[in-house]
Amino acid sequence: MKTAYLTHPSSLRHEMGPGHPECPERVSAISDRLLAHGVIELLDAHDAPAATGQQVERAHSARYFAELRAASPAEGYRQLDPDTAMNRYTFEAALHAAGAAVRAADLVIRGEALRAFCNVRPPGHHAERGSARGFCFINNVAVGIRHALDAFGLDRVALVDFDVHHGNGSEDIFAGDERVLMVSSFQSRLYPFMGETPRASNMRNVGLRPYSDGTAMRRAVRDQWLPALRAFAPQMLFVSAGFDAHRDDDMSQLAWSDDDYRWVSAQLVAIADELCEGRIVSMLEGGYDLDALARCAELHVRALAGID
């Protein structure tokens, strides 16, 4: 059974101004790398549909969703926070990014794919229930998780977030939801300047010291993530896959290597095989050095797909 690969052309039309690090070239860098190295042809490619209002409102308030739609500018940019702006294509792209998570969940839960990777943007894990933040408008992974729980009736889903920035939006949406376990790692004292103190008992947040390398991450995975996942026994894993902890990425001060991303991806596949019949949906989050992003995303996809 092939691993599903989901993307959509609208990901290339959303942009937030010249020089913004969360740029369309991020998606192109990954797709070009997968094509050049013969990986794409081994995947089952799908266009991501647009999420419906009902699907989005499982994770966000109806008021926020209406405000986001109304904020879409006819031309130019509309600034929602100091780092986050909409152009005329942003709302469409955000719907398709969230729709990728929904469609990926459909494919995996129905047994049409074992795992899935969604190469879409804008990213999502900073978007809170009622606000856009940190380059994010709709919390894609949260929409996918709530779809798995509410539309398919799953009882337990785990979210693994290895972005260098804490997934405050995902924590805002899922804190206290006993159906969801969130395990995460991020650089301490970095945007969004929270996460060190979990908001609820279903959160396992591991802050990593600035300038630490992948050794600290591997220790967190072995000592905290894996025991928590085994105790929770999820029926499915969702992943917020951020590649901005790489030592070549100047958005952070962590120093992960390509091999660290290979290792953590392999760990997630192994624990999914052990606990939930291998089922994983992975969503692109951060990663702003295009070369490092492309290399490490390829390693991640290879692990998901079982390609050497």
Image (cartoon, helix red, strand yellow):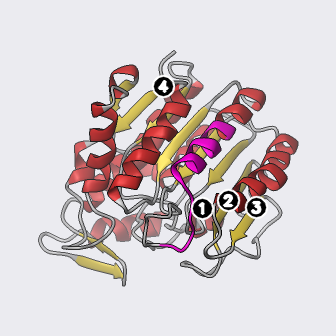
SS class of the residue under badge 2? strand
Give the distance between the C-alpha atoms of the residues marked 3 and 1, in whole angstroms.
Answer: 10 Å
Q: Do the residues labelled 3 and 1 touch (CB within 8 Å)?
A: no
Q: Above or below — where is 302 with respect to 133?
A: above
**Chain-order first, disc 4 or disc 1:** 4
Q: Are marks 2 and 1 in contact (CB under 8 Å)?
A: yes
Q: Which of marks 2 and 1 is in front?
A: 2
Q: Above or below — where is 276 with respect to 188?
A: above
* Number of callouts: 4
Residue 167 position, x and y percent, is 58, 65
Q: Which of marks 3 and 2 is in front?
A: 2
In this figure, which residue is indicated by the disc labeled 4? 3
In this figure, which residue is indicated by the disc labeled 3? 203
In the image, what residue type sits under mark 4?
Thr
Q: Pick out the residue farthest to the left.
A: 75
SS class of the residue under badge 3? strand
**Chain-order first, disc 3 or disc 1:** 1
Residue 288 shown left or right of residue 215 in the figure: left
Give the distance between the C-alpha atoms of the residues marked 3 and 4, in whole angstroms.
Answer: 28 Å
Estimate how packed mark 2 is, as few (under 14), some (14 to 19) or many (20 or more) residues with alpha carbons within 10 Å.
many
Q: Pick out the residue farthest to the top.
A: 1
In this figure, which residue is indicated by the disc labeled 1? 170
**Chain-order first, disc 4 or disc 2:** 4
SS class of the residue under badge 1? helix
Q: Which of marks 4 and 1 is in front?
A: 4
What range is drawn magenta here? 252-267
